[in-house]
Image (tube, rainbow, N blue to C red):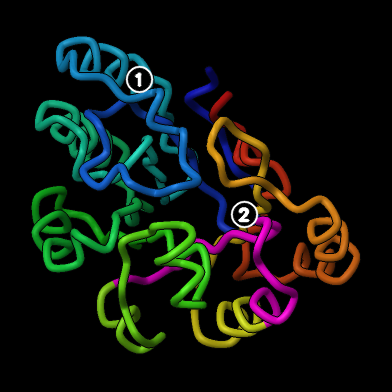
Amino acid sequence: MERYNIITEKFPREIVLLKSKPCSYGKCAFCDYIDDNSTNVAKINQVNQEVLANVKGIYNTLEVINSGNIFDLPKDSLALVKETVEIHQFDKLFAEAHWIFRNHLTKMRNRLDVDIMFKTGVETFDYDFREKVLKKGAPFQSVDELKQYFDSPCIMVGVKGQTKDMIKRDIDIVLNQFNHATVNVYCENTTAIKPDPQLKEWFYNEYKWLDDIKHLEILWNNTDFGVGD
């Protein structure tokens, strides 16, 4: 499991994949990343201390991800994140949080005492597909409602049941209404939600040019940030 990497393009930063407690939501139909979670807090903190020791302060930004939300990290691991930010004088932290934490984002910014760009897994702006198929548990009704809380949506493409029109709308939204977004091309995993190879091929042919869009980060494979397994 790779847990540290340096991203040099678009938004240069160091990135760490930390262990965490079980995801506070944990009901997304497509997610099996929770296999990295643990209830052994001592082990979690040990792993995270070792991972954060790799951080060098190369750029002014650090990204912290885990198999869930930053809110699922134990308090001692959060203290290690804060210490790492202070030691290397990071100006910005990228972190992810589920919709259920929308009213607690300011508390986390204050706790870590750093400017945090909060990502959130939207997966799609199509309400029915997001909530009824993917079981995302993020029942916002509009882009503006989402933007009241979060800075950067993560969307997912190439899922069986998605349509080209859904994807076109999602891409249009992240292109024109956000300053940062991540597009994840869905990969086969252990869940019942399956990728659509033809849709993925269409997306690649139609949208490969997104690689050149500065404010969009495209993960053609889920390990393209250099962390994970």
Q: Quadrant of residue 142?
A: bottom left
**Helix or strand or loop: what does disc 1 sit on?**
loop
**Helix or strand or loop: what does disc 2 sit on?**
strand
> Whole-Å distance between the Cαs marked 1 and 2?
28 Å
> What numbered label is drawn on residue 21?
none
User: Magenta region: which residues?
Assistant: 150-168
* Along the line of sight, the residue nearer the viewer: 130 or 90: 130
> What numbered label is drawn on residue 53?
1
- Labels 1 & 2 near each other (Cβ < 8 A): no
Q: Residue at x 65, y 45 (%)?
A: 194
Residue behind mark 2: 184
* Along the line of sight, the residue nearer the viewer: 72 or 62: 72
Q: Quadrant of residue 127?
A: bottom left
Which quarter of the figure is the C terminus placed in?
Answer: top right
The spot of residue 5 in percent (x, y) is: 55, 31
In the image, residue 124 sits, relative to residue 217, either above or below, namely: below
* Along the line of sight, the residue nearer the viewer: 94 or 20: 20
Label 1 sits on what residue type?
Ala
Q: Which residue of the protein is positioned furthest toward the right in this rendering?
A: 205
Q: Nearer the viewer, mark 1 or mark 2?
A: 2
The spot of residue 77 in percent (x, y) is: 19, 28
Q: Residue at x 44, y 47 (%)?
A: 29
**Mark 1 Cα-neighbour bin, 10 Å: few <14, some 14–19, many ≥20:** few
The spot of residue 47 in percent (x, y) is: 31, 14
